[in-house]
Image (cartoon, rainbow, N blue to C red):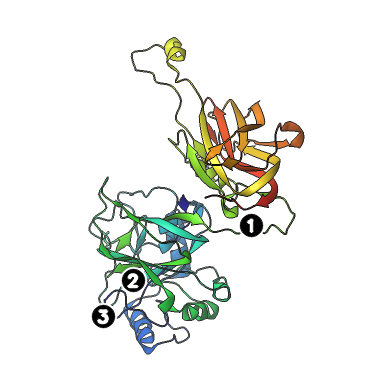
Amino acid sequence: MWGIAILCQTFNQKGQENQPVTAAGGGNCGRKPLVTSRVQRFLRNLAVQNRRASRSDLQGRFQEAGSSGSVTKIGGHVLFATDDWFAPAENLLKYEDPVFKVGLYTDYGKWMDGWETRRKRKPGHDWCIIELGMPGIIKGVEVDTAYFTGNYAPKFSLQAVQLKHDDDAKFPSRQIDAMGTECSDEALALVKSMKTENWQELIPMTPLTAGYINTSRKFFKINSDKVYSHIRLNIFPDGGIARLRIYGQVLHKVDFSIKEEIDLVAMKNGGVCHSYSNAHYGHPKNLICPGVGKNMGDGWETARRIDRPPILQADERNILQVPGNEWAIFRLGCIGKINKVHIDTNHFKGNYPDSAKLEGGLLKNGVIDWKIVLPTTKLSAHAIHEYHSEDMLHFGPFSHVRVTIMPDGGISRLRIFGQPIQEHPEI
Ligand SMILES: NC(=O)NC(NC(N)=O)C(=O)[O-]
């Protein structure tokens, strides 16, 4: 399971939750009228209430928040937020854990690593819409209020929707404004077209707690088999949340009529990390994320396989090395035959594995009979290792692959290129 990132909620002037409205409008001002007069009033109020920040100020604040270098994994992004005064909603999606910077203030207030809106002096509440990186079945949600102590959002709720293909036109990239999303006419039209009666409540209005260490993260199990493409996070009435993580299963239908090679294990093609031996510094699900790994944290990195009490001398380490290797198993997006493999040790320079082995297997009656695809092969630092059919002992068809790294270390990406053959017959 992996993060498929987030979406938005009911706008309600009376501060009540879960009131469906026919259109969702946003906190910009001086723009095209929105759908309801209620929304128009809301926008006008904002315009009067607030000064407008200059674009360069906002740019600086946004970058200061570290968003430019952050990893949002599989492409979830914020479409809209009612207010971004203290800290922009994009921070919710940052892959890195939240941090606190003592004494760092911006022109807007204390710098915070999360989404933080102003203290509301009007009825209503804040909300934002996030498009998931990929449509999928949501299984779990994590809300983290880390470091928001006197300013955390007291309550939140979460809604989700699967937008029809027609509605799913891309929003233009969001122009952050302290007062909220600065919408283009196209974006406004899209917000307007999001039929809020179709939004389903995944988590009802729920209290949050202050973001002290070890108590800031709250997990919610979601029992739904529906596919969603967008979520809507509501905070009541205002305040800050550091991170929002949406976990679930990416929905992907492989087109078997196209005879082209695909990356069978890629998350975007339905690949899933099934199990692993160790994920001390980085989870193996990172191996199947899109794009190039941003840093070591965006790869799979195990702990050193050494159990060395401090009294031991360096030359005694070998005796205590934990026997065995580290491994991770992936379920391919569909059953397929392998043509080419990439093992990328990008960023792993002093800690790349000595060698790696790749096996493939077909799940039958709950059992996998593993066959060697790539025998144990030496790796090198910070490089893409490409293997072709002449390097392989078996090609499949396989439903799963197992990569073993010896004895430990880190790799950044695993690509299993091949021909899709058929859907998995069993879950
Ligand atoms: N010290 C604060 O954090 N104050 C305010 N928030 C920020 N970020 O400045 C507030 O009122 O919530």
Left or right: where 39 falls relative to 374: left
Which is more N-terminal, label 2 or label 1? 2
- Label drawn at residue 14: 3
Between circles 2 and 3, the one closer to the viewer is 3
Instruction: Identify the secondary structure beneath mark 2.
Output: strand
Q: Name the residue under label 2.
A: 126
Which is more N-terminal, label 3 or label 2? 3
Between circles 1 and 2, the one closer to the viewer is 1
329 vs 343, nearest the viewer: 329
Q: How far apart are marks 1 and 3 (CA)?
A: 46 Å
426 vs 179, nearest the viewer: 426
Instruction: Identify the secondary structure beneath mark 3.
Output: loop
- Label drawn at residue 353: none
Between circles 1 and 3, the one closer to the viewer is 1
Q: Mark 1 points at which residue?
A: 254
Which is more N-terminal, label 3 or label 1? 3
Few, some or many residues within 10 Å of mark 3 (<14, 14–19, 20+) = few
Q: Position of residue 421 (x, y in %)?
A: 68, 50
Left or right: where 267 falls relative to 2: right
Q: Specify the quarter for ligand 1.
A: bottom left
Q: Where is residue 64 in the image (x, y as percent from the top left)?
A: 43, 55
